[in-house]
Amino acid sequence: MHVLLIHQAFVSPSEAGGTRHFELAQRMLQEGHEFTIVASDVSYLTGKSVVEGKGWVVEQNVQGVRVLRAYTYPSVHRSFVWRIVSFLSFMLSSVLAGLKAGPVDLVMGTSPPIFQAVSAWLVALLRRKPFLLEIRDLWPEFAIDMGVLKNPILIRLSRWLENFLYARADHILVNSPAYRDYIHNKGIPLEKISLVANGVDPDLFNPQAIGESVRQEWGLGNCFVVTYAGALGMANDIPTVLRAANRLRNQENIRFLFVGDGKERQNLESMAEEMNLPNVIFAGSRPKSDIPDILAASDACLAVLMDIPMFRTTYPNKVFDYMAAGRPSVLAIDGVIREVIEAACGGIFVPPGDDKALAEAVRWMALHPDQARAMGAAARNFVIQYFNRSTQAVEFVRLASKLARET
């Protein structure tokens, strides 16, 4: 079986970001299948080129995984309009790359960005192969709730495109149970929707490690370190964390470590400087392969999102990494991920946007390190049992095989 995935923002462990698709690809290769990924030739995080050669399509071997890098206009970080230009340029070039990928049995598109899902649908149509649509975030609903998408005409067109793809997909894959309910409420039958949840490979993390080299690198000493590892964008509500850090500025043993990058990073660093926060460190982005050591150096971890209804449907990747590392979460996200943390007894939930509650949760963990470590241990046990990437990879391969056989 040969699966073709079109994914503009694909990353490998040597880059910063989630590696769900890389891990699924490796599992398929281990079982004797083929997996080709069409990705952008520009980093989604930095906006810089990730290829050495030039051309509309450049082929790479990324740790055994075949990746076709398709030309993308490098404007994803300029503005909303230029961001769309970047998406549309990849939408066109990825069709060309998809047609050059050789014989395939299944074409998979992933959203967001939703435009690359259009590419996958078109490639599947031209090749007369099944089209598997993966929904990782609910676009355009997230953009509408955040106020990024306001124009009524664009909203109407976006929802039309969303429904168009749902209707034309041979099958839909989601990574959160709430997404399945959302799509079903759009009139899509449940038998057409499969859940392979976000998860993690627990073997990548050693819960007994203490990350001594990381602590030395950033001068953390014996401080209680609270780490946020992820994107620094508008949705991530980092200003609430900075206000919480300000409340704890006199707690000399507490440090907030931000590992990641994004459109808001410069603004957030300026905000921290204006507040003269002595307990905040912006470490920049790091490859996914560095995250185990970074989390090992942490005593607790943060997951935060803006307080909008649609964010209650999401399973953030970072939370599963935190759990696998055996670290307790301070969770400022309500909804389905709160249910996971509370079922695992793996952290403390605080209302989104409430910097006072967030500060108090961090203070409590710093004052009760034994209880915090027990939460982390419980979180790891839970994620091993219910959100293990190995089990999820088996589920994905089974689904892909079923769809390919139906050709």
Image (cartoon, helix red, strand yellow):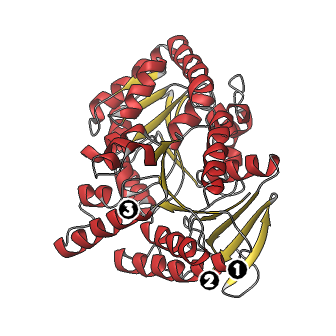
Q: Which residue is mark 2?
A: 96
Q: Nearer the viewer, residue 173 or 206?
A: 173
Q: Which residue is mark 3?
A: 167
Distance between the Cα atoms at labels 3 and 1? 26 Å
Number of numbered callouts drawn? 3
Q: Is residue 275 above or below residue 85?
A: above
Residue 20: % across, % down: 61, 48
Check if mark 2's residue and mark 1's residue have beta carbons within 8 Å: yes
Which quadrant is the N terminus positioned in? bottom right
Residue 113: % across, % down: 45, 66
Distance between the Cα atoms at labels 2 and 3? 24 Å
- List the single residue furthest toward the front: 406
Circle 1 SS class: loop
Looking at numbered disc 1 in the image, what kind of residue is underneath it?
Lys
Nearest to the eye among marks 3 and 1: give it: 3
Q: Which residue is mark 1?
A: 100
Circle 3 SS class: helix
Distance between the Cα atoms at labels 2 and 1? 6 Å
Circle 2 SS class: helix
Q: Is residue 103 above or below residue 334?
A: below
Looking at numbered disc 3 in the image, what kind of residue is underneath it?
Ala
**Label 3 neighbour load within 10 Å: few <14, some 14-19, many 20+:** some
